Amino acid sequence: MATVDRETALLTAEEFASRPDSGMTEELERGRVVMSPVPNRRHGYVCIEVGYRLRRYLEDHPIGRAFGNDAAVVTRRGPDTVRGADVSYYSFQRLPADVDLVPYGPEVPELVFEVLSPSDRWNRLAAKAAEYLEAGVSIVVVLDPERRTARVFEAGRAAVDLGPDDLLRLDSVLPGFEPVVGRLFG
């Protein structure tokens, strides 16, 4: 009879979701659990600032929902990858208001914000942005708190770099949502 070594067995997204909370920041990459350091306070501040501005926009334009706190996005299946988006937006077309939010679903957000942490590297975040786009995310915005800049990734387009005084326009997903990049960092 064959045995399965749990240390090397690949997890599905559903198995990953059912594991006890380790207290660490974790993602699932091609079936394997990957841990990273807990983000610093600046990272959390930027996430809440983006989430606040997005939530305020959605109060005036009730077209979808914003999520934060590393809400899970399944970006690949077989083997599965589950990413924890810092902030994400789903329109009601992609994630209807009456859908149960507890399990991981097949829906992907239209918009993902990732905040660069001191332990992150740009090439890794660019690869993560490409992964989100391949999964069907329309726009990925990577925010760099150190430089107070944003890099915007869209499928089929070159990445666009924005400085602190530039407007972050996301008209294809959120018409009229145009925060000044530098204000996202407090």
Image (cartoon, rainbow, N blue to C red):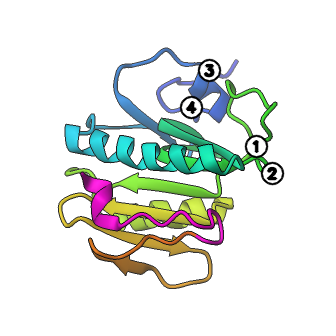
Vertical placement of 21 versus 51: above or below? above
- Residue 173 placed where, x, y %? 65, 64
Q: Residue at x 21, y 44 (%)?
A: 42
| Disc 3 target residue | 3
Q: Which sits earlier in the primary sequence, circle 1 or circle 3? A: 3
Residues under labels 1 and 3: Cα distance? 40 Å
Marks 4 & 1, CB-CB < 8 Å contact: no
Q: Which sits earlier in the primary sequence, circle 4 or circle 1? A: 4
| Disc 4 target residue | 9
What SS does tag 3 mark? loop
What SS does tag 2 mark? loop
Instruction: Read off the magenta span.
Output: 171-186
Q: Is residue 154 magenta?
A: no
Q: Which sits earlier in the primary sequence, circle 4 or circle 3? A: 3
Q: Amino acid at mark 4?
A: Ala
- Give neighbour class at mark 4: few <14, some 14-19, many 20+ (Cα, 10 Å): few
| Disc 2 target residue | 93
Q: Residue at x 26, y 71 (%)?
A: 164
Q: Amino acid at mark 2?
A: Gln
Q: Which sits earlier in the primary sequence, circle 2 or circle 3? A: 3
Marks 2 & 4, CB-CB < 8 Å contact: no
Residues under labels 2 and 4: Cα distance? 36 Å
Vertical placement of 5 versus 76: above or below? above
Marks 2 & 1, CB-CB < 8 Å contact: no
Q: Amino acid at mark 3?
A: Thr
- Residue 127 placed where, x, y %? 45, 65
